[in-house]
Image (cartoon, rainbow, N blue to C red):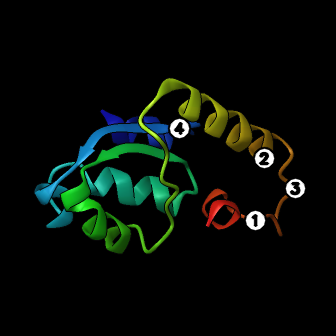
Amino acid sequence: MPSDALSAGADLVIINRFGKRERDGKGLGFVIERALDADIPVVIAVSRQSFADWIEFAGGMSVKLACDRHALDAWWRNVSLRTAARVAPDHITVCEAFK
């Protein structure tokens, strides 16, 4: 169950797509919300038609990546390095750093 992984301290959440169900608070929307609230990065495919809904859902806390492995790898290296160097409690969240 995805929510169990969040409770265990996941480093990253990968969701196959953001669609109408998630926009309407159904589907995996609750998992995405929990991850964002816990400052856990979320990788999710969002269609052009749903992108405005995604931005609203995520409160603007989003980084748009090219749909290719190199872009994802570069993003993750940057995110994971920032996470490793994080100094609590006055750290910048992942979303704030990339906004």
Mark 1–mark 2 contact, CB under 8 Å? yes
Mark 3–mark 2 contact, CB under 8 Å? no
| Residue type for callout 4 | Leu
**In this view of the protein, which residue sits in the foreground, 37 or 71?**
71
**In this view of the protein, which residue sits in the foreground, 85 or 70?**
70
| Residue type for callout 2 | Arg
Query: Rounded to the nearest whole Å, what is the CA distance between mark 2 and mark 4?
Result: 13 Å
> First in sequence: mark 2 or mark 4?
4
Query: Rounded to the nearest whole Å, what is the CA distance between mark 1 and mark 4?
Result: 17 Å
Query: Rounded to the nearest whole Å, what is the CA distance between mark 4 and mark 3?
Result: 19 Å
Who's the residue at 33% across and 39% down the image? Answer: 15
Label for residue 82? Answer: 2
> First in sequence: mark 1 or mark 4?
4
Q: Can you give x and y, in whole percent of width and height, for residue 29 in the image?
A: 26, 56
| Residue type for callout 3 | Val
Label for residue 12? Answer: 4
**In this view of the protein, which residue sits in the foreground, 50 or 37?**
50
Who's the residue at 33% across and 50% down the image? Answer: 31
Structural crowding at the residue carrying mark 4, measured as other residues with C-alpha within 10 Å and reported as few (<14), some (14–19) or many (≥20): some
> First in sequence: mark 3 or mark 2?
2
Q: Secondary structure at mark 1?
A: loop
Q: Secondary structure at mark 3?
A: loop
Q: Can you give x and y, in whole percent of width and height, for residue 39 in the image?
A: 58, 57
Who's the residue at 59% across and 37% down the image? Answer: 11
Q: Residue under circle 1?
A: 92
> First in sequence: mark 1 or mark 2?
2
Q: Residue under circle 3?
A: 87
Q: Secondary structure at mark 2?
A: helix
